[in-house]
């Protein structure tokens, strides 16, 4: 259960499950790509930068708040938002950064909902985590609900294998799923420590239920740990028994949830082949949330932080095609242009993460100005029981060697 506290006027605090931000602030898409997953639009470019007056308003509100506010900016945020971030990083790094600033009364998380939940879990009770737009969700995290996962566990129990199964959940999951993981003896992983998490889990049991990103689970098991594709089965929560037989469940080592990142899932083997034909000598560097055939065809694979570090260490004059969210790719291309590093987006079709991009400058200004006026808006709170078990799963990850 997630509770959102929002203020409509000074002193007017209401506890609701969902409270939309003002309609005028919502980012409107221009057109849809029929190949994209639900909740993702690919207009080809973002709207023009916001009114320059908003930049000054954001600076003024942030200056007025001073040390009371700490702004976190995920790598996939647009430049006009990221310029106001006190720190940038991937989801878990930012949650840890927030926990390391106990003096900040407000944590403004420029990211998506599951990230703000993780920040609330890891910060103190006195700190308030704010998500500038409550519509900034994550289609991958939404692909695994608490009810679906509980039903899956019933299926595993009926198959007589639940006691052998250790759940491992990707950081990109809701607090409810993290809590389920903690309650059933599992751990959380990030894209950078997934191998260590799977190794730990196989020491605890014979099988792993990997939630909610099938591609990270499959790529880690097959590419990094030497398992085969036959060792992996795909559990579809929309089919009876996940679309699997009892024999398939009993034979599998990796039970992968049918979820994926709608942005990384767009990259294809054709994309890799095309960029190699267009740019001789190009290095293909992709995120492990990409499909298995894309990862297998790439030269380098790694987390967002690994992508950045690889480009930092790359020699001048090298050429790179990057398979990850476009805001980051553009930022890296601009950053390393002076070093004569050619950096291009892997796919011909430009696709931003539409939910991540809901955190635009108007939303950020609204949140900061509201806080500066003493109005707490869009607070993300995780209930005590969920927090207890989700934190347990996160602590198991932190304890990994």
Image: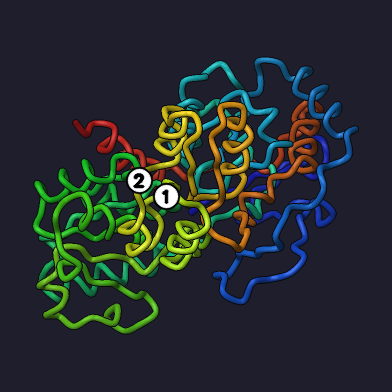
Q: Mark 2 and mark 1 in contact (Cβ < 8 Å)?
A: yes
Give the number of the disc on residue 284. Answer: 1
Residue 334: percent from left, percent from top: 64, 35
Q: In this view of the protein, which residue sits in the foreground, 289 or 139?
A: 289
Residue 356: percent from left, percent from top: 61, 50
Residue 16 seen in render: yes
Give the number of the disc on residue 376. Answer: none
Q: From the viewer's perspective, is 64 left or right of 254?
A: right
Residue 200: percent from left, percent from top: 16, 43
Q: Quadrant of residue 268?
A: bottom left
Q: From the viewer's perspective, is 127 left or right of 47?
A: left
- Element at badge 1? strand
Q: Quadrant of the C terminus?
A: top left
Q: Residue at x 74, y 20 (%)?
A: 65
Q: Residue at x 47, y 37 (%)?
A: 318
Q: In this view of the protein, which residue sits in the foreground, 289 or 202?
A: 289
Q: Quadrant of residue 144?
A: bottom left
Q: In this view of the protein, which residue sits in the foreground, 2 or 296?
A: 296
Q: Is 63 rendered above or below residue 327?
A: above
Q: Quadrant of residue 360?
A: top right
Q: From the viewer's perspective, is 14 left or right of 195?
A: right
Residue 193: percent from left, percent from top: 29, 40
Rendering colour mode = rainbow
For label 2, the residue is 300
- Element at badge 2? strand
Q: Residue at x 43, y 50 (%)?
A: 172
Q: CA distance from mark 1 to mark 2?
A: 6 Å
């Amino acid at each position: 259960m997630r509770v959102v506290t929002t203020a409509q006027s000074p002193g007017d605090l209401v506890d609701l499950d969902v409270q939309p931000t003002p309609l005028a602030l919502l980012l409107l898409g221009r057109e849809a790509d029929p190949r994209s997953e639900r909740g993702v639009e690919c207009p080809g470019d973002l709207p023009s930068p916001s009114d320059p007056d908003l930049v000054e308003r954001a600076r003024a509100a942030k200056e007025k708040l001073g040390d009371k506010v700490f702004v976190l900016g995920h790598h996939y945020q647009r430049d006009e938002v990221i310029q106001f971030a006190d720190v940038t990083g991937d989801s878990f790094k930012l949650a840890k950064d927030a926990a390391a600033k106990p003096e900040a009364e407000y944590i403004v998380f420029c990211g998506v909902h599951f990230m703000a939940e993780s920040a609330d879990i890891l910060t103190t009770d006195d700190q308030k985590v704010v998500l500038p737009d409550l519509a900034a969700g994550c289609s991958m995290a939404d692909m695994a609900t608490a009810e679906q996962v509980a039903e899956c566990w019933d299926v595993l129990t009926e198959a007589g294998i639940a006691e052998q199964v250790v759940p491992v959940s990707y950081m990109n999951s809701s607090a409810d799923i993290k809590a389920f993981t903690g309650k059933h003896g599992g751990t959380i992983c990030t894209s950078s420590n997934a191998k260590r998490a799977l190794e730990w889990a196989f020491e605890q049991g014979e099988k792993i239920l990997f939630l909610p990103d099938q591609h990270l689970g499959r790529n880690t098991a097959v590419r990094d740990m030497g398992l085969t594709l036959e060792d992996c089965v795909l559990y579809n929560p929309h089919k009876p028994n996940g679309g699997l037989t009892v024999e398939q469940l009993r034979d599998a080592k990796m039970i992968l949830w049918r979820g994926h990142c709608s942005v990384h899932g767009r990259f294809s083997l054709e994309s890799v082949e095309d960029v190699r034909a267009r740019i001789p000598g190009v290095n293909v560097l992709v995120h492990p949330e990409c499909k298995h055939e894309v990862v297998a065809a790439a030269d380098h694979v790694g987390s967002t932080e690994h992508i950045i570090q690889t480009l930092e260490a790359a020699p001048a004059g090298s050429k790179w095609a990057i398979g990850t969210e476009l805001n980051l790719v553009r930022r890296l291309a601009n950053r390393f242009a002076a070093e004569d590093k050619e950096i291009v987006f892997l796919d011909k079709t430009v696709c931003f993460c539409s939910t991540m991009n809901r955190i635009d400058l108007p939303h950020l200004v609204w949140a900061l100005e509201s806080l500066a006026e003493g109005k707490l808006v869009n607070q993300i709170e995780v209930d005590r029981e969920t927090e207890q078990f989700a934190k347990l799963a996160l602590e198991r990850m932190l304890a990994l060697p």
